[in-house]
Image (cartoon, rainbow, N blue to C red):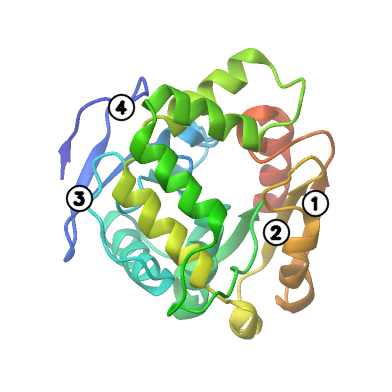
Amino acid sequence: MHQANKIGSPTARSSTMLKHGRISYLERGAGEPLVLLHGINGNASSWELQLDTFSATRRVIAWDAPGYVDSDVAGDDLTDLARVAIAFIRQVTDVPVTLAGHSMGGLVAMKVAIMEPALVKRLVLSCTHPGHALDRNGEADERYKRRLDELRNQPPEVYGERRARGMLPAGTAAAVFQRIADIAAQSRLEGVAAAAWAIQTADLKPELARIQAPTLVITCDQDTVAPLAKAQPLLDLIPDVRHVALSGLGHAPYLEDPRRFNAVLADFLASA
């Protein structure tokens, strides 16, 4: 394990070597572990305000998914990403953990809880869904092909601003918009391509009943990426599930209103 360069964050990243290669991550605090998995437009820095808040009482670890920041690519199937997450969790912390995933990270977190239930004490699913269930022999849908073309052909700051506009409701504070745009602008093509394909081809609905951990599902009424309609199968099929709907927020509640998001998470940590 060693310290990596700073990437859009005041805290230097650590990294660890797994069988497939390196995973970079941020960590703070000590105590019971909380592991955070970001979305397709994010990286570990997405969770800075959760790292700040929850590290006062526990050890908080936020990874850079394979293909993000300094993490090596590890396949384009959800099972591939979950296997890396399982190996990462086992390597860097004691288990079981509270595992929280946002959007794409939520799919990875669910798959981890399905594959290795003993690793997950609690599960938090923010603005996510069970996958789009497209045929792997077909092509990713036009929206994702467009996104990859933008990332390939546009300056990073333009890509980041477009992603922020797609995630956030009108009237979002300029500083929040810029922070999300800056993080999205750090995206690497290989990481986004693998994650996008995993999301498109995943179908977790048949497996959701195997999740044993108490689960919190967070949805936001201004989220056009993963609205309640897409999250509904999680509420219908996960056995021990509770739901919190946040009003006035889009697809990045952890940064749009961190006080409210953190309060919901803290309540779940205390009660589940």
Residue linked to disc 3: 16
**Secondary structure category for the residue under label 2:** strand
Residue located farthest toward the top when viewing the structure as drawn: 174
Measured Cα–Cα span from mark 1 to mark 4: 32 Å
Q: Amino acid at mark 1?
A: Val
Q: Residue 39's spot in the image, x, y percent?
A: 51, 47
The answer, for residue 51, to whether it is visible in the render is: no
Work out how far the residue at label 2 is from the one at label 3, CA to CA, in angstroms: 29 Å
Task: Please report whichever mark, 2 or 1, sits nearer to the chain's N-terminal start.
Answer: 2
State if disc 1 and disc 2 touch (CB < 8 Å). yes
Residue 123 occupies quadrant: bottom right
CA distance separating discs 1 and 3: 34 Å
Residue at position x 82%, y 48% in the image: 245
From the image, state whether disc 2 or disc 4 is nearer to you: 4
Q: Earlier in the sequence, mark 3 or mark 4?
A: 4
Label 3 residue SS: strand
Query: Decide: marks 1, 3 in contact (CB < 8 A)?
Result: no
The amino acid marked with disc number 2 is Leu
Are there few (<14), some (14-19), or many (20+) residues within 10 Å of tag 2? Answer: many
- Image quadrant holding the C terminus, namely bottom right
Assign a secondary structure to mark 1: strand
How far apart marks 3 and 4 lie (CA) works out to 16 Å
In the image, which disc is placed on residue 7? 4
User: In terms of depth relative to the viewer, which is nearer, 32 or 36?
Assistant: 36
Residue highlighted by disc 2: 216
Residue occupying the point 43% across, 63% down:
197
Q: Position of residue 180 (x, y in %)?
A: 53, 28
The amino acid marked with disc number 4 is Ile
Of the numbered discs in the image, which one, if any, rests on residue 244?
1
Q: Secondary structure at mark 4?
A: loop
